[in-house]
Image (cartoon, rainbow, N blue to C red):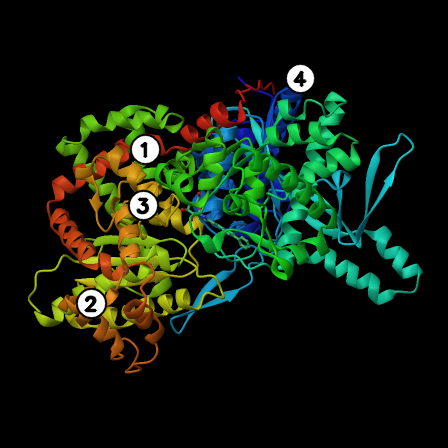
Amino acid sequence: LVRVEDDRTGMSEQSLKRAIVDNLHYGQGKDNYFATPYDYYMAIARSMRDRLIKRRIQTARTHIQEDSKVVYYLSAEFLMGRYTGNSLINLGIYERVRKVLRESGLELDDLLEKEHEPGLGNGGLGRLAACYLDSLATLEIPAVGYGIRYEFGIFEQEIRNGWQAERPDKWLSFGNAWEVSLPEYRTEVKFGGHTESYTDTKGRYQTNWIPEHTVFGIPYDTPIPGYGVNTVNILRLWKAESSNEFDLDAFNAGDYLGAVANKMFSENISKVLYPNDDTVQGKELRLEQQYFFVSCSLQDIIRRHIYHYNSLDNLHEKSAIQLNDTHPSIGIAELMRLLIDVHQMDWEQAWHITQNCFAYTNHTLLPEALERWSVNLFGRLLPRHLEIIYEINFRFLSEVRKRYPGDNERIARLSLIEGEGADKKVRMANLACVGSRKINGVAALHTKLLQQDVLRDFYELAPEKFINKTNGVTPRRWLLLGNPRLSNLITEKIGEAWITNLDELRKLEQFADDPQFRQTWREIKQANKQDLAAYIERKNHIQVDTNSLFDVQVKRLHEYKRQLLNVLHIITLYNRIKRNPNEDILPRTFIFGGKAAPGYFIAKLIIKLINSVAAVVNDDPSLEGRLKVAFLSNYNVSMSQQIYAAAELSEQISTAGKEASGTGNMKFALNGALTIGTLDGANVEIREEVGAENFFLCGLTTPEVYELKAKGYNPQEYYQSNSELQEVIRLIACGHFSDGDSQLFRPLLDSLLYNDKYMLFADYQSYIDTQDRVSQAYRQEDNWTRMSILNTARMGKFSSDRAISEYCKEIWHVEPVPVEFKE
Ligand code: 26Q
């Protein structure tokens, strides 16, 4: 029986084959004589995009027909990872396309690696946004992700002589098969200038903003398919372009340089992603970026809402706008401005709508990561918004004063404006709290600490606004795509329901004591380790023993994450072997990966130390078969998929009370790695789920950290009484890892010995003891495997589907909208 299918939609082997050949010819202009692997990749990507576009159109039509409420996820970062493999998975045709290509002598997995990963985020926050888009589509929730189409994403990291060097990420230079630009929906954004007030003919008080610059935002859409459903949502990213009219005016007035300057101002805005996470500097361009994408997005939301409903009165009934941290929180003032100045609404109604549209997710406990903009800069760039923020603040503080008469300190803490005189600041977290209906932390401990600490005054004022939403990760990318061997085994045993209902993994518990199953489980980890070992050999020229324990810490470099504590452990083992060459040490391979913010000197010095220790350890014949250290350069989403699949020990050792949640911790455990970790962020909940006996706990608890700090923490007390620790520090200090240079790592040692803000010394012994327990446990192969199986089996809670279902019910009040698909 022959089925007639469109080459752009058909799912049969024949249609897929024809589609790929068609896209190779007419998309890339090549036949199989001239085609490079990249051309084939592009042809596959376009063939998938065609299939998704068809579903996207059907999805959009359905959402309009049903007057659906829509979730708008505003985020300065989306760390999507490669699209093509994920789209094959979510369309359910990965194996079929692989087979079709094999028949032509092509290897799908090799071709997929040609895709340049869109690195439009720094780390956890951006990747969370990506997992949430996957779950929103899979749960059939109408949703749009809004962000910035950075021309340069997160920098490419190179290691030169042990140091991090940065190179620009030119991800667009060979074209992007996944995006579609929509110049007809370009949106104008104003900057600078001044405001003028007047009374209109109806006696209404009006404000006019006369800007200094105007910029266009051009939307670029990428389809976001759900798994096993017809829903295809979109990620809409804005590119900044100059507004030609403005340039022409300037040209005509003879101001050539002025016109060019304006063009440069405009095109700068979406040029580059800021590579800092968890520390903020009040840079003007960053505020321009934030306002740019938020204004474009809100105007886009309003345009479509009016087109559909012909009124803005019900905007909050049909839209839920989520603020991914404070980065888009200027949206609160911008929506007020659009409703009042542009759409002539009165303040009370506009405020009611605004407060009921927005909700705010906080991702940090570090005070240095809270965004504060100088009032001066703010007023220069966004004069109208500063007026609106003052008005919001005036009304808000009047209410606060009624509630707490005379409590001036509290009022000062709640105020949207901090300080006096010249260095006044706008507090974006306070703006986000006042303008939102719900405020959430990203793990149970984090939400509790927000309530007690960082946002305590807001919690006391409006406890009903606070809610916890423990993070989750998508099982499609982080198990099905990233670990096909394990996925196949799981599906063989318990069926494929786990892919969209991760609690199903519990059914694996029944096999935890089955010798045959354990054996297979081990063989799969072993095969994944071999793949990673081959990668390490190719990239780092280090031969690692695949029978050694793969001990992995991959995440952004930051002092609070304590990669340095991990290094202290490595040197401790090194010293033990040097002291006693016959010491029976469990063979380990220490694997590191992660980028440091380019201006973060101490983080870069930690990378240099890791590479310096690696150079000494890996070259020492007496350590052969015992210790190896590898720092994998340019850690990104694609690399991480391979690493999680091969990891056996997951290092989650932040100082308690500092890591808001962590999400890497979830990806490791889902792939059967055991965790060594502190009671921080979501580690607490992971331990609860997998069972304390299947988790290696170490370090102080948050209350103990606070207590120690309060009574005056002195690292010397720990140092003086710990000879093994002294030996470690002395070895670094004498230049053993730096060709005799005793000064190179001085800044690290001084910070540990005389300050130790993140209490590494306080946790050192506990960490070492726990690592010794890990070594013993690993030797009991059968029990280790059992613990590994139980970790995977009990990770159901950490699916982003669970997290997103909770957001839908408790924050956004949205329901699934099934999409029918007719070819
Ligand atoms: C802000 C202003 C100016 C420049 C940069 C920034 C900026 C950018 C990115 C500030 C913070 C970030 C990223 C923060 C982040 O990734 N936080 C992590 O979020 C994860 C998801 O909730 C958590 O799991 C992590 O614990 C948290 O550190």
Q: Are marks 1 and 4 in contact (CB under 8 Å)?
A: no
Alpha carbon of mark 2 to alpha carbon of mark 4: how far? 68 Å
When the figure is inspected, residue 366 is found, relative to residue 447, above or below; the finding is: below
Q: Earlier in the sequence, mark 2 or mark 3?
A: 3
Nearer the observer, 707 or 681: 707
Q: Earlier in the sequence, mark 2 or mark 4?
A: 4
Mark nearest the camera among 1 and 4 is: 4
- In the rendered structure, the answer to whether residue 52 lies left or right of residue 597 reads right
Name the residue carrying label 3.
680
Alpha carbon of mark 2 to alpha carbon of mark 3: how far? 24 Å
The dot on residue 719 is 2
Task: Give the quadrant of residue 469.
Answer: top left
Mark nearest the camera among 2 and 4 is: 2
- Residue 573 seen in this snapshot: yes
Name the quarter where the C terminus is drawn: top right
The dot on residue 65 is 4
Disc 3 residue type?
A: Asp
Estimate the x, y position of residue 626 in percent, counting from the top left. 17, 62
Q: Earlier in the sequence, mark 1 or mark 3?
A: 1
Residue occupying image coordinates x 25% and y 49%: 704
Estimate the x, y position of residue 400 in percent, counting from the top left. 56, 37
